[in-house]
Image: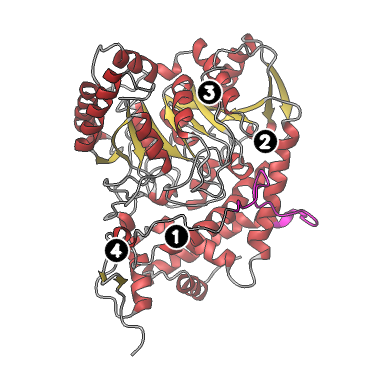
Amino acid sequence: MHTMSIVELAAGLHQGEFSSEELTRSLLARIKNLDPQLNSLVTLAEEQAIDQARNADQRLAGGDATTLTGIPVIQKDIFCTQGVKTSCGSRMLDNFISPYDATVVEKLNQAGSVMLGKANMDEFAMGSSNETSFYGPVKNPWNPETVPGGSSGGSAAAVAARFAPFATGTDTGGSIRQPTALCGITGLKPTYGRVSRYGMIAFASSLDQAGPMTRSAEDAAIVLGAMAGFDVRDSTSIDKPVPDYRANLNDDIRGLRVGLPKQYFTEGLDSGVGDRIADAIDVYKKLGVEFVDIDLPNTHLAVPVYYVVAPAECSSNLSRFDGVRFGYRCENPKDLEDLYKRSRGEGFGAEVQRRIMIGTYALSAGYYDAYYLKSQQIRRLIRDDFVRAFEKVDVIMSPTSPTVAFKLGEKTADPVSMYLSDIDTIAVNLAGLPGMSIPAGFAHDLPVGLQIIGNYFDEARLLNVAHMYQLETDWHNRIPAGFE
Amino acid sequence: MSLDRKDVERIAHLARLAINEQDIPDYAHNLSAILELVEQMNAVDTTDVVPMAHPLDAHQRLREDEVSEQDQSSLFQSVAPQVEQGLYLVPKVIE
């Protein structure tokens, strides 16, 4: 059952070929057997999962089921789950049991999905390799000596290893798309404001967005439909109806205009990755797609701008962790300042501390104009590049990552080299646009991801474009050796 | 922009982070490298560019001024490190 898609599993459940409890028990056993190799989950929610599965079986029997009823999911550990630990990959929240559910969790619960557990992740979603987690790195199922990408590395590895048909992720600078690419799965970062951020532990609030991580575009369409929607509890949620993302999956894409930005095809691009992207372009040409060269002249500024905006917002968001109201508290504080400083110093890991310090510096008296204000000005220039491009093209394609998965430990000593691994994904977050990554073959025996960027709220078109490719190719059905 | 030991200590204090003495040189090195990356922004002329607060220029929603939250203080305090009689306990601030 572990190799079946959401669509196939839903058919099996609805036709009574197997129960959700059987499916859930078999995947829980699979995780217990195989995850020690990967470390992709930090919490297994066995009892709750069985309860949810039994409820789902009743719903299925009663005829009141959705496509996701009884379908197992792994939640990134950034989403608050009532009664199940929510650590955000940090020592700071190692003891944290949320008193409420995130909206994404609530919506998937209402749809009847079954949460198997919580996925490992970079601490507070700050990282591109899943090596900053308090619970240790995640291994890439395609080669355990390489990283799965990050920050949603646990989610990506778990879906690639067939532990669950889908997982949730969050994407602030590429944290859904980059691990999706490095693990050979399908993932979508929606338009900023499409999915509620309520109960999703905040990193950089003007960039954070949750989305589905699945094996196929068709499955992503189902999950996004369940996750998306207006939420009064998130002040940046957009009040716009959620379309049926499956309705246009099979639309003919003949005549579709696709932009290829030259700034994403430079000398930093690994030639093996470049070859696979060229192959994908050929597949699309056969489908009648028209390619146009486009110019996004401010692309090179995306990483510098991001490393002001994201740390500034992180330093402000993470000021809530004070050792007083929840989370880690140091032993025997001698006064209030010592309580704050040691709780934060001991509770946060090195990368989180670096980003808090950069943000604190950028926002400190006398530096605001030179850093935060400047970055928000350039952010508009980056956004305007995309707005102009979308006057000429329907979607934009590029590599998701300039390289395949790198070796564990290769970039941990040099934060800037780690940051540059998100060079192809960050601009999309700064502009607030939707972006997808789909598997497009292999280079150096590791998966390559094709990024598809759309105009605001054009998720249905991204899914359509991705689905048409997946009808022509089988990269999304490849399974890593040892996880068949 | 290159940061020295004193800068790192000052920033760590502003951020209320206790950092180890022996880690300061590493922080100074890495934070300086990040600021160097960021400084590529200086080459761009941004005169008259309006800072972008939201990609879709959305504004803060307003609502009626009425009570919308229930009192859940005891539930929220159940995850606090130290509470007594509905109050969060911290080391003594006033002698």
The mark lying in front, picked from 4 and 2, is 4
- Tell me the number on the disc at residue A318: 1
Is B31 placed above or below A290 here? below
A246 displayed left or right of A20: right
The amino acid at mark 4 is: Ala
Q: Secondary structure at mark 2?
A: helix
Which numbered circle lies on residue A347? none
Residue drawn at (63%, 14%), measured in percent from left and top?
A253
Residue depth check, mark 3 versus mark 1: number of the one nearer the observer: 3
Compute the Cα span from label 4 to label 2: 49 Å
Look at mark 4 in the image and give the residue it sits on. B80
**Residue under the point 27% across and 45% down:** A84
State yes or no: discs 3 and 1 in contact (Cβ < 8 Å). Answer: no
Q: State the SS at label 4.
A: loop
User: For the residues marked 1 and 4, what is the alpha-carbon distance in whole angstroms?
Assistant: 17 Å
In percent of the image, x 32 and y 48: which residue is there?
A86
B15 on left or right of A280: left
- On the question of residue A213 being in view, the answer is yes
Residue type at mark 2 is Gln
| Residues rendered magenta in the picture | B42-62
Quadrant into which the N terminus of chain B falls: bottom right
- Work out whether disc 4 and disc 2 sit on a shared chain: no
Q: How is the image coloured?
A: secondary structure
Residue A245 is labelled as 3
Q: Which of A55 and A431 lies nearest the eye of the viewer?
A: A55
| Quadrant of the frame with the C terminus of chain B | bottom left
Residue A367, compared with residue A32, is above or below; it is: below
Residue B3 horizontal/vertical position (percent) = 54, 68
Q: Nearer the viewer, residue B76 or A364?
A: B76
The answer for which chain carries disc 1 is: A
Q: Are marks 2 and 1 on the same chain?
A: yes
